[in-house]
Every structure is written in C-alpha cells, then in structure tokens.
Amino acid sequence: MSDQITINVDVLNDSNLVAKVFTKARTLLNGARTLFFGPSHETSLPDTLAMSVTDAKPNGNYKGVTRPSVKRTSTIVVAGQDPATSITCPLIGNIEFSIPVGASSAQCMIIRQELIAILDDDTIMEPLMMQSIAPFA
C-alpha cells in the first residue's frame, strides 16, 4: 500500500473538490491493517484513516469470505449536557465488506458503486443520519 493516499472530497457538497492527503503512520498485523494520519492529526485530536483485511477461513467445501474494511475517524467538538461546555469526541464512519472467495472484480465493483450512490444521496443519508441524533439534540 502506498505511503500516501489522496482523496478528493466535495466538502461543501457544491461540486468543488478539495484534495485531502493521508500519510501512512504504521502497518500492523503483518500488513493486515494500515493506519494513515490525516492533515489535521494530532495525538490529542485524531484524524485517521484505517484500512484492514481479514483473511478468509475455509469451512469444509466453502472457501470462506475475506473482509476488507475502511474506518475514518475525525475529531469534532459538540455541546455538552451543559450548553456552556463543549466536548471533544470522535466522529466515525465504517465501511465493511464480506466478499466470498471467488467473487469477481466486477461483482465487487457493482456493490461498491451502489454503496457510493447511497452515501452520496442526501435524500437518503441526511434523514438517516439526523434521525439518529435528533432525539438527543
């Protein structure tokens, strides 16, 4: 895996892309997990991107599944129970796959593209994400 990953992000959802560079910090578990630091990473304010792959475990005639995943963690500040205080906490997004051994690249691409379409559709994601926090706001 490369020492740097650059992603182009439509931060304001206005079709203007901003490049964000993540730099490899370390590789763990014999290469099964790689951690990258984002541009605003500090020890006390993590800004990370983690990528990992869990190998397939065959069972009888079944070859098993491999489990690649991506985890994005960004530190944000939110109001505390007492509105005069603020709390620093992680905002986390996970993408996990379970890919049967033998799946084709085309089959994997289709499910990935479908997920991208869902994640990029504000009529789906905005209500989903806001309903999860509305009862507590």
Image (spheres, helix red, strand yellow):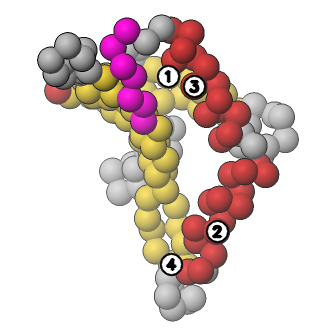
Span shown in magenta: 96-102
> Pointer 4: what residue?
86
The answer to whether mark 3 and mark 4 are in CB contact below 8 A is no
Which residue extends farthest front?
61
Mark 1 is on which residue type? Ile
Q: Secondary structure at mark 3?
A: helix
The verdict on residue 115 being magenta is no
Q: CA distance from mark 2 to mark 3?
A: 25 Å
Q: Secondary structure at mark 1?
A: strand
Task: Please tell me the numbered disc located at residue 111.
Answer: 3
Mark 2 is on which residue type? Gln
Q: Earlier in the sequence, mark 1 or mark 3?
A: 1
User: With 63 as the anchor, is 2 left or right in this view?
Assistant: right
Mark 3 is on which residue type? Ile
The verdict on residue 99 being magenta is yes
Q: CA distance from mark 1 to mark 4?
A: 32 Å
> Pointer 2: what residue?
131
The answer to whether mark 1 and mark 3 are in CB contact below 8 A is no
Q: Secondary structure at mark 4?
A: strand
